Image: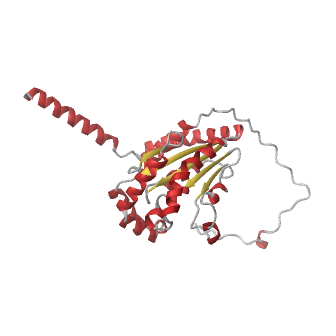
Amino acid sequence: MGNKEHNGKVAELKKSEKKDKSKFKKLSKKKYEKELAELQIELVKLQRWVQQKGLKVVVLFEGRDAAGKGGVIKRISDTLNPRVCKIVALGKPSDREKTQWYFQRYVAHLPAAGEIILFDRSWYNRAGVEKVMGFCTYDEYNEFMRSCPQFEMMIQRSGIILIKYWFSVSDDEQEKRFRQRITNPTKRWKISPMDLQAREKWVDYSRAKDDMFAATDIPESPWNVVEADDKRRARLNCISHLLNTIPYEDLPVEKIELPPRQTAIDYERPPMNTQSFVPTKY
């Protein structure tokens, strides 16, 4: 290879590296908030469309601990009607639930017409934490991996729109977020003994995730991976993808006019000293 050709290759490589680094350039708070506000307006439009057309939507959010699932769920639901957009974050199954068909307690939370359900972790607990931590048997795990694609295709045939997201976070970034949670009193509740054990089993979780994708990342129900080392970009990218995945239209908004307030007819407010008011501390 001549010097000229070699220098050209080096320049091309540097240009490529510069482009890759720019992809991870920190997004300014001002730009993030502007983009988020626009996306949230679109989410409201999507909500109206879902209600008007009687759609049934399920969105699954999976990923490692501290990957940012809760953050994007919060930004999606912030401006939506909680009666329409519902968050499901199930805890440890009860003794009775442990004896049920595995998918049974999740089925109870599937949407009716005009509803959007956001699962903060889902039935994929069996392929992740239950598999790695030994909370299910070998046979239970294998049955899940075999039946999960069939279950998802079944609920889709029933008319439910199913979208699956996996939030991918690097080892270093997860470590950083865990340390922030430990030192921040308002976030300390987010870190549990199970999270700490998951750190010790990082590679086991990686293998479990790869096996899960191999069995359940199918054309009818694909996984959508969100690069989540940059929280702001991850939120915007996920919401944008969600909006592009569900076709919707901007329905006309009904004009609202406030009626005149009722005039007082023989009404007198009770004395204020008869009521207990919250102290004006601030």
Residue 149, position as x, y percentages in the image: 54, 47
In the rendered image, the vertical position of residue 11 relative to residue 153, given as above or below: above
Residue lying farthest left?
Answer: 3
Q: Front-most of 242 and 98?
A: 98
Q: Is residue 50 above or below residue 143?
A: above
Q: How is the image coloured?
A: secondary structure
The image quadrant that residue 108 belongs to is: bottom right
Residue 220, percent from left and from top: 54, 40
Q: Quadrant of the N terminus?
A: top left
Instruction: In the displayed orientation, state which residue is furthest to the front.
Output: 139
Q: Between residue 25 and residue 108, name the one nearer to us.
A: 108
Frontmost residue, 33 versus 167 = 167
Residue 226 shows in this picture: yes
Q: Say if 63 sits above or below 136 in the image.
A: above
Residue 236 visible in the displayed image: no
Is the C terminus in the top left, top right, bottom left or bottom right quadrant? Answer: bottom right
Q: How many marks?
A: 0
Q: Position of residue 150 (x, y in %)?
A: 57, 47
Q: Residue at x 62, y 50 (%)?
A: 117
Q: Is residue 98 above or below residue 233?
A: below
**Residue drawn 70% across and 41% down?**
51
**Direction from residue 38 to residue 205 in the image, left or right:** left
Residue drawn at (34%, 57%) of the image: 171
